[in-house]
Image (cartoon, rainbow, N blue to C red):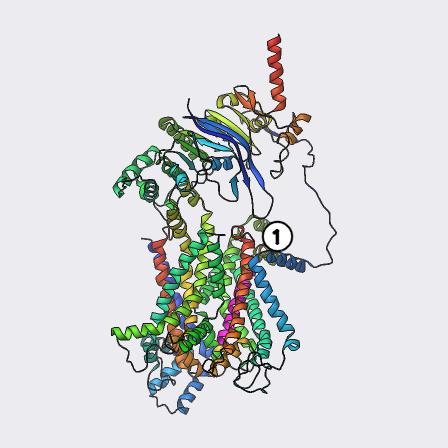
């Protein structure tokens, strides 16, 4: 399979005018293959949205990319700026924001939004008449399962779910090869959530673009995606195929996360929690960031950063688990 | 189905968190502490700092006026209509009064009117705004209507009319007239903020716990509006200073008092421009402008305090 | 088309109009001393002959020493409907209505053009300052606007008058038109009138500019943090499109609401500036009226100014409906 996006050593730092610098993404390596549907999960503040913005070059001051290489289809996009960057968004990467509620300009109708996008990326000689915009618009809103009348509405005349679908349609209008969905259904109620997620899944399957779904809701992600990455304190601590993760996690943090989801049909429902708090992101990290809250923590965990090593069908960054697997492999090879 | 919560293990104190117990500052009353802290934060904003300096300078001049002014402002002992000389740095008026001394003493009235009218207008604005914002229904409707009416009626013409009718009385007439016409802007802003705060949970909690209305308004709502009230005050003070100058210039104030506005009035009456005494026009006007600007600058600092997005890199 | 909103605004307009008229009615009657006696006394002292009808008109405007309040109120309202405001003793040969009638167009032109000019320039500067926030352009614009905001408009007018008219002779010194000319709609007169209006207009415009600049700049900064701006950039829209059609267009809305209200301040400024330049508008008339304690004229002027403001605000409110699709839903 061809690699579409390759990121190495991505760091993102927040430099507020007054106050300490905070690294919200540290040392992230990431590879996405064409046509994959990847999920990125973690608790609030773990840096997943920041990472998404970094990958789509949407970081704004005081946040900034602090070293690292990002290659999109072989082209380095980490250092591209201005007009060249803007053109990358046609047939390149796209971002769908969390609050579909607020992602649309209140004073412009949907068809005007679409017209703006199409005209902004028009090539030499390409003209978009009102009729052409409407035709393309009809196609796009049909793709996201909305009626054509939506084109003539203002954002405040649409429900939250409809606005989210319109956002997706606008992102699709540029025929991107990579779309990041940042918490697309968090602001919606459960029933609408299911419908929108189904639409996203179908679109990804039919159109074949590479998708990244960001959410703090593990359930939604595991259901929709092929592969899941777990983030903690700005680092990726585990990556597994979704089905494998459902069966069992390797990193203690992922385990704890899964443990927070209880079976409501059980006789006794134990609500798990992970005690402690996120580490201070302004201090340089020595050792595993999860160490203070980890029930498996050992001395080496506080001193050395665990690398992402192969565990199960994917990778995880844990000294203890890696050692267990290594021991098991040894035992098997010996015995 | 029973729900069991797993008890978390005892927490160890997080890294890098220090709990410091300082000496109890009971000696300094809370409002002063608050003022000190507010001034310190304003000082950190460059624009506000400049504004505070100018205001401080003017206050200093006003307080030390008898010590600084070389002559009495009203003594008509000098040659009238003379330009700047060694004895009269800014020249003299048509009545033979020293303009420089008038400028120094004039700071007192101008400052006093500006601050007093601003404070009075803000007081009215806060009262009306809070009551209207906190009590929905008939009270709110009536007060809002009155506020809108006061907003729509042009301020300066109304001030002119009122001052013309009430002419010849004390300087406090001016203060009252100015305050009466400038409370509405602040009231509208405070009312909308009070309406927002009214539905916040901590207010609902206070109501449910039986706190009396007075305490709720002053303990829960008002402290969350301090920057708004401060901004309102500085805005009202700016308007008051300019209004006082305008009224005096038109001859509607009390010509027997010495303020920067009356200096302008007499200068205009005596056709200072035609006699080449432009300094008598330039100096008081510049002083008024600088003072008005300084209040606006301080307001920049207040704005930046309340809206982090507006904070600048200074 | 949003009938309910428009209907509400019309009702509000009518009620506010009534309240303003009533306030105008009550004002001279609440003042200490007796303005009506003073007015009548002044007229008598000046030897100005007045007809009974004119005397009644003045009494109605300022307060009859006797008679019930309700009948006075009714007569007041009918008097206004007939534009009968009485006689002014500053202009012995004219009724108040005539004096106001000849002064009004001057102020309309001055205030009207200045306001529109200041609004457009101020808004554009504010957009630019907000878009380029923190950079040199922003600081220059903000500091400049702050600086000019504190200037009393009459002071700026006086200085301009001194340096540019008196000393340098670039502009005419006083009046709305050169002495000796009669007002007409001829091109030469209009050109002359325009020449005379430049300095007052500039003085007014510069001092009122800053309000727009700040309002717009702050709105821009707030709007730029909104998600739809981020999304527009994520979709690769050109910078200019985002700045104007997405950010500025939305940031403009609160400013338009403020526009109507700010007219009061501009009218106030016009009063002062006209006085300085002797520009024959309503402001100058008020200046003269106040200097002469000409109460009938003062009252009528106040009424005219207030009602014009109300009408202007009403028109702006109606215009706002076209600008913001969310209103009235």
| Residue at 70% from the left image edge and 34% from the top image edge | B12
Left or right: A156, with B117 as reference point: left
Instruction: Decide which of C264, B198 is in the foreground and name it.
Output: C264
Query: Which image quadrant for residue A188?
Result: top left
Quadrant of the rendering where the C terminus of chain A is positioned: top right
Apparent side of residue C291 relative to residue A115 in the rendered image (left or right): right
Circle 1: element type? loop
Magenta-colored span: B229-247
Identify which residue is drawn at 47% across, 37% down: A53
Q: Quadrant of residue A238?
A: top right
Say above or below: A165 vs C272: above
Please report, as a chain letter, where disc 1 is located: B
Badge 1, how many Cα within 10 Å: few under 14, some, many 20+? few
Do we see residue C31 in this rendering? Answer: no
- Work out whether C217 lies above or below C59: above
**Residue C234 in the image, given as x and y percentages of width and height:** 42, 40
Indicate yes or no whether the magenta region holds residue B230: yes
What x and y, as percent, mark residue B224?
Answer: 58, 54
Question: Which residue corresponds to mark 1?
Answer: B210
Q: Is residue B274 above or below residue A332?
A: below
Give the percent coordinates (x, y) of residue C143.
Answer: 49, 60
What residue sits 56% from the left and 44% below the top? Answer: A15
Count of marks placed on residues = 1
Residue A53 lies in magenta, yes or no?
no
Residue A179 place in picture, x, y as percent? 42, 33
Main secondary structure along the magenta-highlighted residues: helix
């Amino acid at each position: 399979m061809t690699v579409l996006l390759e990121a190495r050593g991505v760091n993102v730092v927040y430099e507020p005018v007054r106050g300490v610098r905070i690294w919200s993404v540290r040392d992230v390596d990431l590879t996405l293959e064409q046509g994959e549907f990847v999920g990125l999960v973690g608790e609030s503040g773990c840096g997943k949205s920041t990472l998404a913005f970094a990958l789509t070059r949407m970081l704004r001051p005081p946040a900034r990319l602090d070293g690292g290489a990002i290659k999109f289809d072989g082209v380095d996009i980490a250092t591209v700026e201005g007009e060249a960057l803007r053109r990358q968004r046609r047939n390149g990467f796209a971002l769908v924001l969390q609050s579909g509620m607020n992602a649309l300009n209140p004073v412009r109708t949907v068809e005007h939004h679409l017209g703006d996008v199409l005209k902004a990326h028009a090539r030499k000689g390409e003209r978009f008449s009102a009729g052409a915009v409407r035709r393309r618009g009809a196609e796009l809103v049909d793709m996201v399962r909305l009626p054509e009348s939506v084109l003539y509405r203002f954002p405040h005349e649409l429900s939250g779910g409809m606005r989210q679908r319109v956002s997706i349609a606008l992102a699709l209008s540029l025929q991107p090869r990579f779309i990041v969905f940042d918490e697309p259904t968090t602001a919606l109620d459960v029933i609408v959530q299911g419908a929108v997620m189904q639409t996203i899944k179908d679109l990804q399957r039919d159109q074949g673009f590479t998708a990244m779904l960001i959410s703090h809701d593990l359930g939604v992600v595991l259901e929709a995606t092929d592969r899941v990455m777990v983030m903690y304190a700005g680092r990726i601590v585990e990556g597994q195929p979704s089905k494998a993760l459902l069966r069992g996690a390797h990193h203690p943090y992922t385990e704890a996360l899964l443990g927070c989801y209880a079976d409501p049909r059980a006789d006794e429902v134990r609500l798990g929690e992970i005690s402690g708090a996120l580490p201070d992101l302004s201090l340089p990290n020595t050792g595993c960031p999860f160490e203070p809250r980890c029930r498996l923590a050992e001395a080496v965990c506080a001193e050395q950063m665990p690398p992402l090593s192969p565990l199960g069908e994917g990778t995880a960054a844990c000294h203890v688990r890696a050692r267990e697997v290594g021991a098991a492999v040894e035992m098997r090879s010996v015995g | 189905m029973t729900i069991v919560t797993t008890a978390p293990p005892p927490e160890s104190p997080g890294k890098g968190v220090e709990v410091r117990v300082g000496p109890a500052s009971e000696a300094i009353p809370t409002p002063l502490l608050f003022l000190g802290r507010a001034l310190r934060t304003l000082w950190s904003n460059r624009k506000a700092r400049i504004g505070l300096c100018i205001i401080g300078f003017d206050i200093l001049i006003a307080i030390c006026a008898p010590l600084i002014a070389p002559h009495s402002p009203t003594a008509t002992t000098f040659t009238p209509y003379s330009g700047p000389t060694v004895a009269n740095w800014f020249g003299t008026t048509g009545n033979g009064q020293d303009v420089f001394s008038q400028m120094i003493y004039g700071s007192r009235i101008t400052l006093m009117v500006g601050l007093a009218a601003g404070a009075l207008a803000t007081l009215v604005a806060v009262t009306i705004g809070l009551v209207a914002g906190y009590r929905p229904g008939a009270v709110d409707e009536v007060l809002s209507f009155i506020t809108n009416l006061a907003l729509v009626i042009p301020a300066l013409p109304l001030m002119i009319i009122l001052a013309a009718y009430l002419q010849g009385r004390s300087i406090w007439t001016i203060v009252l007239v100015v305050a009466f016409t400038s409370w509405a802007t602040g009231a509208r802003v405070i009312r909308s903020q009070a309406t927002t705060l009214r539905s916040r949970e901590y207010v609902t909690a206070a109501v449910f716990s039986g706190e009396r209305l007075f305490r709720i308004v002053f303990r829960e709502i008002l402290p969350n509006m301090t920057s708004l009230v401060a901004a309102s005050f500085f805005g009202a003070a700016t308007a008051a200073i300019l209004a006082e100058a305008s009224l005096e210039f038109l001859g509607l104030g009390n010509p027997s008092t010495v303020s920067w506005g009356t200096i302008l009035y007499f200068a205009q009456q005596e056709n200072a421009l035609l006699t080449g005494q432009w300094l008598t026009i330039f100096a008081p006007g510049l002083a008024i402008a600088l003072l008005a600007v300084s209040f606006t600058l301080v307001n920049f600092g207040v704005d930046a305090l309340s809206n982090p997005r507006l904070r600048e890199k200074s | 088309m949003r009938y309910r909103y428009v209907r509400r605004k019309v009702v509000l307009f009518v009620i506010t109009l009534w309240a303003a008229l009533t306030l105008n009615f009550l004002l001279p009657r609440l003042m200490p001393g007796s303005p009506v006696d003073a007015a009548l006394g002044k007229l008598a002292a000046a030897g100005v002959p007045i007809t009974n009808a004119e005397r009644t008109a003045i009494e109605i405007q300022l307060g009859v020493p006797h008679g019930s309040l309700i009948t006075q109120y009714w007569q007041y309202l009918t008097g206004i409907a007939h534009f009968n405001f009485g006689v002014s003793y500053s202009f012995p040969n004219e009724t108040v209505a005539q004096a106001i009638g000849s002064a009004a167009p001057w102020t309309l032109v001055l205030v009207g053009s200045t306001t529109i000019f200041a609004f457009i320039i101020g808004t554009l500067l504010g957009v630019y300052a907000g878009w380029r926030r923190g950079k040199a352009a922003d600081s220059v614009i903000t500091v400049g606007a702050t600086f000019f905001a504190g200037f009393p408009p009459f002071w700026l007018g006086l200085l301009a008058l001194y340096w540019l008219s008196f000393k340098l002779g670039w502009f005419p010194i006083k009046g709305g038109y050169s002495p000796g000319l009669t007002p007409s709609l001829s091109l030469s007169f209009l050109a002359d009138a325009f020449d005379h209006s430049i300095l007052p207009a500039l003085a007014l415009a510069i001092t009122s500019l800053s309000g727009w600049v700040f309002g717009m700049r702050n709105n821009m900064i707030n709007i730029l943090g909104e998600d739809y701006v981020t999304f527009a950039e994520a979709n690769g829209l050109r910078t200019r499109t985002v700045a104007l059609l997405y950010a500025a267009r939305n940031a403009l809305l609160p400013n338009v609401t403020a526009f109507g209200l700010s007219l009061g301040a501009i009218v106030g400024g016009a009063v002062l500036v006209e006085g300085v330049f002797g520009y024959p508008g309503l402001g100058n008339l008020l200046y003269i009226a106040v200097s002469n304690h000409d109460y009938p004229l003062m009252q009528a002027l106040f009424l005219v100014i207030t009602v014009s403001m109300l009408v202007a605000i009403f028109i702006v409110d109606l215009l706002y409906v076209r600008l913001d699709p969310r209103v009235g839903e």
